[in-house]
Image (cartoon, rainbow, N blue to C red):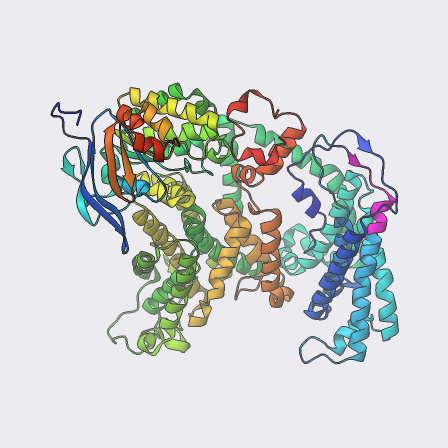
């Protein structure tokens, strides 16, 4: 599309079909994410958004088709293989390790890394971004407020030194005031050069920060355009943005 | 069982300072009648239940204070007092004024005691007039005799009302006492009961310390045929009470000083404490008699098992109900390799191995078994996993019992003639020398404690905890959850197999029915009661459950209770889950987490959390809101 500068896509899906048993979830899904992009995947309930994320990370294996990371086919590689090469997921509802300390949560984000000095440097970077997190370092993650938990979840994901963050419904379960802050956070992380792939139901908000977007309907990509074009698309406005 | 003095202080342990202001006591008849009545009925039911378990009759021969008070009566008497105390207990919230205690509380206690006593009166009447022996096996003339205090039935029916009333009133009166007096009384009571109950072990100890004049003391304290003497009980009560008044504060202050230490001095204090405990464990057994050493050895075997299960359940969060399988594999492997009397299917040329050599095989086999059982099980989660492991635990035992493997394992006859362990030609460790067994167990416990301690702080330990908290997310972090869980199984299996190998040498034989499912359950209860994921807790849990109550086949200190062991385990487990879910030795942080609501409530009452504080934008958006008023 817009990226014709020749660099290979960071993450790519080629003709992916995914089944849960006999149920056909993803149907010939095809798209690519380029380095440093902020793209969003929109879709209603049961449209296959989460499955797309799981397929990208390797928690679900596609029946046919391939997942490519930096141009390399990683369809059969393990999750840890992909995490090590820069794919990290921020799960739905934050899902912190509630009874472990904030420090442990962050360290677990860097589980696959062994370069202690680089890890410590990343920790410092996260404290700079979220000073609140540093104050809460020895506290149990489950005792933090919703906003703080969101910061720790982002921090934990960043600790793996990702090239692309896969975010599953980051605004779900957050108070309206927090949703805004949350998208600011996403923009902030994006500005540091991390590509971001956001799966959202909150289409307005997601499109307002994204470069590009796809719309998934019952497992099929039905729309694929720039964010502005999608925002202007009358069909999308009707079905997702609540306008008639 | 006599925990009445500790009950209230435990559940309010997190609410330290009651308010300065006190509301005036409520009027005597301003009762919550329904609650009083409910507690009374509950007490009556519990008393009748305890009576019908036959506990009073079975324990009646065991005198606590000669000649007036037996353990049988104690099993009934403590209940009305506790219920009388509990009925008027109200949660004390920091900063909130509470009512002063007065005649209202005493009346409630008396009434509860009275209704409870009435329950026993009715039982006495029924015992005399009906024969319900068919459904209720303990419906016996002996019980009637005990309930009527060896007189006629009418006396029995009449006496339980005042007895219940008086005991309940005592419970109610406890509200009126000042904290110090209440503490003194409960300590006095507790020390008499403790010395009476632990008579066997104290007698055993006195032999080791005879050179200190311990024997003279014991002769004064105890009656020849068992039970405390009257003057002995009086002395103990006074000593206990005085300690509560003076010594306890000092102990508390010392503990506070210890807790206040930080950094290197804290580490040093910890190290010294550890050294003292280690030295005591090495030196003390020399002075202990056979009974105590036997108890300690049994406790040690279960510490090993529980530490292993603690890794599986406490750290990795895998609820393994078939853990006994690894204990069995350790016992059988060590037994078969070292005995002269193994199953007939083994070739004749197979040598009799030294125990230490056999241990290598034990470790390898246990690790393989851990992998073998773990691999299919590990892909399951939660309830399914628990049920499947339960099945595997039985499968292993049934295999050892089966015709198929019977030729190798001796089937129902088991493996016998297992020799003791030769230690560098210095000593032979076997069942007849419990002290040597204890040292061997101690050695392996030390290894297990060190391994647990290191693993908890390792990368693997962190992965286990992440899996325990949220397996899918742990997987998304790139943790190889299958490998980590298998490792937990393997480490747990190896620790259990050590215990099994020592058991084989100690007892000299292994049978399939030494490894019933009950063993798994008991180990799990030890871990839960002690405090999951906590090394010290697991050790305390073993001491309390195995040492005092006894293991599945091992007698504990309270041998009289062995028939009621499982009943008490069950009651203890339920009580723990309700009142102290963090276990006997809680991990401080975990306690906070489990009691977080109480903390937040208290903090709010003290005004430390302000609903309109600067956090309004986000801090109340989830979780915490539940306990904060809008």
> What range is drawn magenta here?
B98-108
The location of residue A211, given as percent across then percent down, is 26, 24
Q: Position of residue B580 (x, y in %)?
A: 60, 46
Residue B380 in view in this figure: yes
Q: Residue at x 88, y 68 (%)?
A: B158
Check the picture and name the quadrant holding the N terminus of chain A. Answer: top left
Question: Would residue B248 be counted in the magenta stretch?
Answer: no
- Is residue B178 rendered to the left or right of residue B296? right
Q: Position of residue B495 (x, y in %)?
A: 39, 54
Identify the residue shown where x is 82% and y is 37%.
B100
Q: Residue at x 41, y 77 (%)?
A: B412
* B49 lies left or right of B265: right
Res B67 visible: no
Comparing B421 with B545, the one in front is B545
Left or right, A4 with respect to B443, comes to left
In the rendered image, the vertical position of residue A237 relative to residue A16, given as above or below: above
Vertical order, B177 against A189 (above or below): below
**Closest to the observer: A125 or B367?**
A125
Quarter of the image with the C terminus of chain A in it? top left
State which quadrant residue A9 falls in: top left
């Amino acid at each position: 599309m817009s990226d014709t500068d020749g660099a290979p896509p960071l993450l790519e899906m080629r003709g992916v079909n995914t089944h849960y048993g006999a149920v056909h979830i993803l149907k010939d899904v095809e798209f690519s994410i380029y380095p440093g992009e902020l793209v969003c995947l929109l879709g209603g309930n049961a449209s296959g958004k989460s499955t797309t994320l799981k397929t990208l990370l390797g928690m679900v294996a596609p029946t046919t088709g391939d997942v490519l990371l930096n141009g390399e086919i990683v369809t059969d590689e393990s999750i840890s293989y992909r995490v090590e090469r820069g794919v990290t997921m921020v799960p739905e509802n934050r899902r912190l390790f509630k009874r472990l300390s904030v420090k442990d949560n962050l360290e677990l984000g860097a589980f696959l890394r062994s370069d202690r000095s680089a890890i410590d440097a990343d920790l410092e970077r996260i404290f700079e971004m979220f000073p609140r997190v540093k104050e809460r370092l020895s506290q149990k993650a489950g005792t933090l407020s919703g906003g703080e938990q969101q910061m720790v979840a982002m921090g934990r994901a960043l600790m793996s030194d990702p090239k692309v963050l896969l975010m599953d419904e980051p605004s779900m379960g957050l108070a309206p005031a927090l949703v805004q802050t949350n998208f600011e956070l996403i923009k902030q992380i994006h500005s540091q050069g991390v590509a971001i792939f956001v799966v959202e139901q909150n289409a307005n908000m997601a499109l307002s920060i994204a470069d590009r977007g796809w719309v998934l309907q019952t497992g099929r990509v039905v729309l694929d355009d720039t964010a502005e074009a999608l925002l202007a698309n009358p069909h999308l406005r009707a079905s997702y943005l609540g306008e008639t | 069982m006599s925990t009445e003095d500790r009950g209230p202080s435990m559940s309010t342990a997190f609410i330290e300072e009651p308010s300065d202001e006190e509301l005036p006591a409520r009027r005597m008849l301003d009762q919550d009648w329904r609650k009083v009545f409910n507690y009374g009925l509950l007490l009556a039911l519990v008393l009748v239940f305890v009576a019908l378990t036959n506990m009073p009759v079975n324990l009646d021969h065991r005198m606590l204070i000669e000649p007036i008070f037996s353990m049988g009566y104690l099993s009934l008497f403590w209940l009305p007092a506790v219920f009388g105390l509990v009925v008027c207990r109200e949660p004390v919230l920091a900063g909130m004024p509470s009512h002063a205690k007065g005649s209202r509380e005493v009346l409630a206690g008396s009434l509860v005691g009275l209704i409870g006593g009435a329950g026993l009166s009715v039982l006495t009447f029924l015992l005399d007039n009906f024969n319900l022996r068919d459904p209720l096996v303990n419906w016996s003339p002996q019980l009637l005799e005990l309930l009527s205090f060896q007189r006629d039935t009418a006396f029995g029916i009449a006496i339980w009302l005042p007895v219940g009333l008086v005991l309940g009133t005592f419970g109610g009166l406890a509200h009126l006492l000042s904290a110090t007096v209440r503490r003194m009384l409960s300590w006095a009571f507790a020390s008499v009961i403790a010395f009476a109950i632990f008579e066997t072990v104290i007698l055993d100890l006195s032999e080791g310390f005879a050179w200190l004049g311990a024997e003279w003391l014991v002769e004064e304290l105890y009656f020849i045929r068992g039970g405390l003497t009257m003057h002995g009980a009086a002395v103990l009560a006074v000593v206990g009470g005085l300690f509560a008044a003076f010594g306890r504060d000092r102990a508390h202050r010392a503990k506070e000083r210890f807790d206040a230490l930080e950094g290197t001095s804290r580490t040093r204090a910890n190290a010294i404490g550890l050294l003292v405990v280690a030295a005591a464990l090495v030196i003390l057994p020399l002075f202990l008699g056979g009974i105590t050493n036997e108890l300690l050895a049994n406790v040690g075997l279960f510490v090993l098992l529980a530490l292993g299960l603690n890794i599986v359940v406490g750290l990795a969060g895998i609820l393994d109900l078939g853990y006994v399988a690894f204990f069995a594999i350790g016992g059988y492997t060590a037994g078969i390799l070292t005995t002269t009397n193994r199953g007939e299917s083994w070739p004749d040329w197979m040598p009799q191995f030294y125990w230490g050599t056999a241990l290598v095989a034990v470790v390898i086999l246990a690790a393989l078994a851990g992998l073998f059982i773990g691999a299919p099980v590990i892909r399951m989660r939660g309830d399914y996993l628990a049920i499947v492991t339960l099945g595997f635990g039985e499968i292993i035992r049934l295999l050892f019992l089966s015709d198929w493997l019977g030729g190798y394992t001796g089937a129902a006859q088991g493996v016998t003639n297992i020799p003791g362990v030769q230690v560098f030609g210095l000593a032979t460790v076997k069942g007849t020398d419990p002290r040597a067994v204890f040292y061997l167990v101690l050695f392996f416990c030390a290894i297990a404690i060190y391994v647990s301690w290191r693993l908890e702080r390792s990368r693997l330990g962190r992965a286990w905890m992440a899996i325990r908290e949220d397996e899918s997310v742990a997987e998304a972090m790139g943790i190889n959850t299958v490998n980590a869980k298998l490792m937990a199984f393997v480490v747990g299996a190896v620790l259990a197999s050590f215990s099994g190998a020592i058991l084989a040498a100690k007892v000299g034989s292994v049978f399939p029915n030494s490894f019933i499912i009950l063993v798994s359950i008991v180990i799990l209860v030890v871990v839960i009661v002690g405090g999951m994921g906590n090394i010290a807790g697991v050790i305390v849990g073993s001491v309390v459950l195995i040492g005092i109550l006894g293991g599945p086949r091992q007698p504990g200190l309270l041998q009289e209770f062995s028939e009621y062991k499982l009943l008490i385990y069950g009651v203890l487990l339920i009580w723990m889950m309700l009142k102290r879910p963090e276990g006997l030795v809680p991990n401080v942080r975990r306690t906070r987490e489990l009691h977080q609501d109480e903390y937040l409530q208290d903090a709010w009452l003290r005004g430390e959390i302000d609903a309109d504080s600067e956090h309004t934008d986000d801090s109340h958006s989830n979780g915490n809101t539940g306990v904060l008023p809008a």
